[in-house]
Image (cartoon, helix red, strand yellow):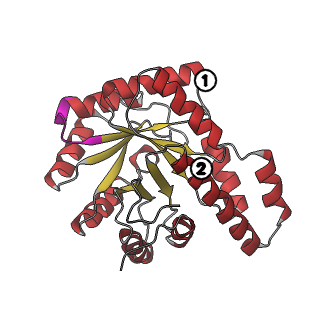
Amino acid sequence: MQSQKTHPKLFSFEFYPPKTEEGAASLQVVHSKLAKLNPDFFSVTFGAGGSTRDKTFTTVVDIQSKGISAAPHLSCVASTKANIRAILKDYQDNGITKIVALRGDLPSGMMSAGEFRYANELVEFIRQETGDHFQIHVAAYPEVHPQAASGVEDFKNFKRKVAAGANAVITQYFYNAEAYFHFVDACEKNGITIPIVPGIMPITQYTQLFRFSEMCGADIPRWLRKRLESFGDDRESVQAFGLDVVSNLCQRLLEGGAPGLHFYTMNQAAPTLAILENLQIKPQD
């Protein structure tokens, strides 16, 4: 493995907006630790239906003010052209140059997505309003979006996002490297050449991972699920085994040509730092 000094890959880290002052203070510590890895950017999620819009904005501007590039998530759900236009202007005024554009999930009870039905429409609108100001990242699902009619239809939807003006791709997390490589091959065959960065979810707790994976459609391979189940309540064993599994996955992805890694941190630094240390990529003092 290569050391950080010679490693050509880019890394990014995702946070969710803290809900409390205690959570905000904790996140300050987390992103200060991860900032020592000199990441490409920190991204900040956007709650279902825009429920965390103000907190997302506050978190993004705070990160940006500390000299690290920040990429706010924007979602279609419950959004109008007017409020997206206003949000884009606020981000431009605060020096934000990256955005993660998503369709987003419908909150329970919400029947209409808003003025934007799909992420490609949001990407197109951002381009119309702001030209090339923003580097736009979009999502991809190597194991197929859980709501897609088929793999073919899912890939068609993905191509629309790219054609609308996306600069880069962040995938949903997965634990089967072949799913990623197969997706990249399909992109290359279709003339898609923008970076496709694998999303990485550290394994720290089986029940939480299972719940998230059920919601987002990420597959936990049977062998992995059975091994995790076998540890029962032995959290230390789950974490040690998960660290080994995810570190090996990351190494294989990087050696196979992945342009970098995007970590879903769950607002924790230690699990991600442990994986990167296994890859011999360490914070700089």
Picture quadrant of residue 179: top right
Picture quadrant of residue 240: bottom right
Give whichever of 119, 5 is nearer the camera: 5
What residue is disc 1 on? 151
**Kind of residue indicated by mark 2:** Arg
Give whichever of 8, 121 is nearer the camera: 8
Residue 272, given in percent of the width and then of the height, sits at 53, 65
Q: How many marks?
A: 2
Q: Quadrant of the C terminus?
A: bottom left
Q: Is residue 226 above or below residue 112?
A: below
Residue plotted at (62% across, 52% down) = 249
Give whichever of 255, 20 is nearer the camera: 255
Outermost residue toward the bottom in this view? 285
Q: Is residue 134 magenta?
A: yes
Residue plotted at (57% across, 54% down) = 250
Q: Secondary structure at mark 2?
A: helix
Q: Secondary structure at mark 1?
A: helix
Mark 1 vs mark 2, foreground winner is 2
**Kind of residue indicated by mark 1:** Gly
What residue is disc 2 on? 252
Q: Is residue 228 above or below residue 105?
A: below
Q: Is residue 170 above or below residue 234?
A: above
Residue plotted at (21% across, 51% down) = 91
Disc 2 crowd rating (10 Å Cα; few below 14, some 14-19, many 20+) is some
Residue plotted at (76% across, 52% down) = 224
**For residue 75, which numbered disc appears in the image?**
none
Q: Is residue 83 visible?
A: yes
Q: Is residue 249 magenta?
A: no
Q: Which residues are magenta?
A: 128-135
Residue 36, given in percent of the width and then of the height, sits at 36, 72
In the picture, measured across the screen, residue 60 lies left or right of residue 169, that is left
